[in-house]
């Protein structure tokens, strides 16, 4: 598992823990990053641009520092 997938797991856990609407927040993340959050798998390559976009989206949308 890489950095990108680890970020996905942390973000999903935060959404669950806060009992937020997963579809809404994953959609907002997808719109901001330009890629589907749900398609990040354990085998997804660590693309530095995607990692940074996902970190920024988590901070902007969820106020989550990852």
Image (cartoon, rainbow, N blue to C red):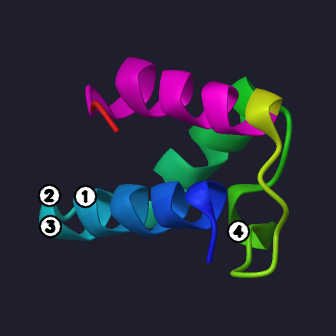
Q: Magenta segment range? A: 50-64
Q: Secondary structure at mark 1?
A: helix
x, y percent for residue 53: 67, 27
Tell whether 63 sits left or right of 27: left
* Magenta stretch: dominant secondary structure: helix
Residue name at image x 82 percent, y 69 percent: 44
Going by the image, does 53 lie left or right of 17?
Answer: right
Q: Is residue 49 covered in magenta? A: no
Cβ atoms under marks 2 and 3 closer than 8 Å = yes
What whole-number distance in Å separates the C-alpha atoms at marks 3 and 4? Answer: 18 Å
C-alpha separation, residue under disc 4 versus residue under disc 2:
19 Å
Q: At 44% from the left edge and 69% from the top edge, which residue is drawn?
A: 9
Tell which of 1 and 60 is nearer to you. 1
Residue carrying label 4: 38
Give residue 32's position: percent from left, percent from top. 69, 25
For this rendering, which residue is in front, 33 or 43? 43
Q: Which residue is mark 2?
A: 18
Of the numbered discs in the image, which one, if any, rests on residue 53? none
Q: Position of residue 13 (x, y in %)?
A: 29, 68
Instruction: Name the secondary structure under disc 3.
Output: helix
**How many marks on residues?**
4
Tag 4 or tag 1, which sits nearer the N-term?
1
Q: Secondary structure at mark 4?
A: helix
Distance Cα–Cα, label 2 vs label 3:
4 Å
Mark on residue 17? 3
């Amino acid at each position: 598992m890489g950095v990108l997938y680890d970020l996905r797991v942390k973000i999903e856990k935060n959404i669950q823990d806060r009992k937020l609407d997963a579809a809404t927040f994953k959609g907002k993340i997808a719109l901001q990053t330009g890629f589907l959050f749900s398609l990040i798998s354990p085998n997804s390559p660590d693309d530095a641009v995607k990692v940074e976009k996902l970190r920024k989206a988590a901070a902007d949308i969820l106020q989550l520092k990852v």
